[in-house]
Image (tube, rainbow, N blue to C red):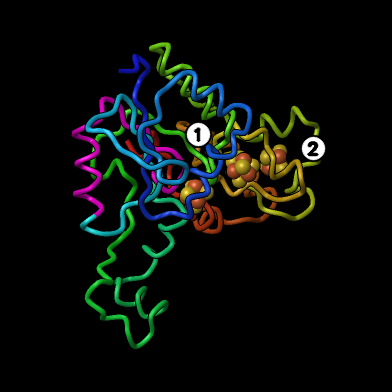
Amino acid sequence: MSAKPKVAFFDFACCEGCQLQIANLEEDVVQLAGLVDVVEFREVLTGSAPEYDIAFIEGSITRKADEERLKNIRSRSKLIVAYGQCAVTGGINRLKNRWQTMDEVKKQVYGDHFNMPHLDTYRTKGIDEIVKVDLYIPGCPINRDEFLQVVKELLLGKTPKMPNYPVCVECKLKENVCLFDTGITCLGPLARAGCGAICPSNGAPCDACRGTVADPNKNAMHEILMKYNYTVAQIKNKIDIFGVDPEVKK
Ligand code: SF4
Ligand code: SF4
Ligand code: SF4
């Protein structure tokens, strides 16, 4: 039997884009394979195991049946890592929670057939609303390098720390022109860094796909809102797309 830690990957409601980030690690897959024994990963292999040292969970919880499956995985895993914003907060799937009822959501998709019995969807939840989560890897999608770093640190017995400073720090280090100066709203002052400010560096606003920093400097954001005539409601509406960071919820 292999002495390497047993690692498994599971997905719930999501686009599977975060799994693809891992499947596309290319030469780093060899490095990963040398560190762990991947025993379950639907996207890249068949097979399973009765228990795991680390279970990586992707996707949000949207049905009662998901809860039972997730609890079963929790009962068989020493560590649970929520990876990708769908698992961390519910992610983009949370948009359906803006409707008053799930019947309204189902009508949007299925029209007159919205009442079919298998359409048992409910309000989207992050996985920590069902089971205890030991670690979060934010992002939509996750950053591959950050994922590898997390795996290495976990194997060394360390507790990985996510950056707790805003995207603006990385953006300013790159000497970008601030998008607010061009009339574009950007969540960089509140968003959790770690992506290298990839969006503003390419002319697109940050939408806080990695959630918000645990202690957002609201005063700095407030000053920016006042300076550029934005409202708190406009910003809140945008933040809600990817959900509030778990550390902020606590
Ligand atoms: S976090 Fe984004 S990329 Fe990852 S599975 Fe969810 S929607 Fe897809
Ligand atoms: S607000 Fe956006 S564009 Fe401006 S510095 Fe911050 S991250 Fe960069
Ligand atoms: S810049 Fe913002 S939206 Fe873009 S990847 Fe980074 S955190 Fe996500």
Q: Quadrant of ligand 2?
A: top right
Whether residue 125 is visible: yes
Dot 2: few (<14), some (14–19), or many (≥20) neighbours within 10 Å? some
Which kind of residue does numbered mark 1 sit on? Val
Badge 2 marks a residue whose secondary structure is loop
Which kind of residue does numbered mark 2 sit on? Asn
Q: Position of residue 137 (x, y in %)?
A: 46, 34
Mark 2 C-beta closer than 8 Å to ligand 2: yes
x 38%, y 55%: residue = 13
Q: Quadrant of the C terminus?
A: top left
Q: Nearer the viewer, residue 92 or 9?
A: 9
Q: Quadrant of the N terminus?
A: top left
x 36%, y 80%: residue = 107
x 69%, y 45%: residue = 199
Looking at the picture, does residue 24 appear above or below residue 14? Answer: above
In space, the residues marked 2 and 1 are separated at their CA atoms by 21 Å
From the image, tell me which residue sits under label 1: 213
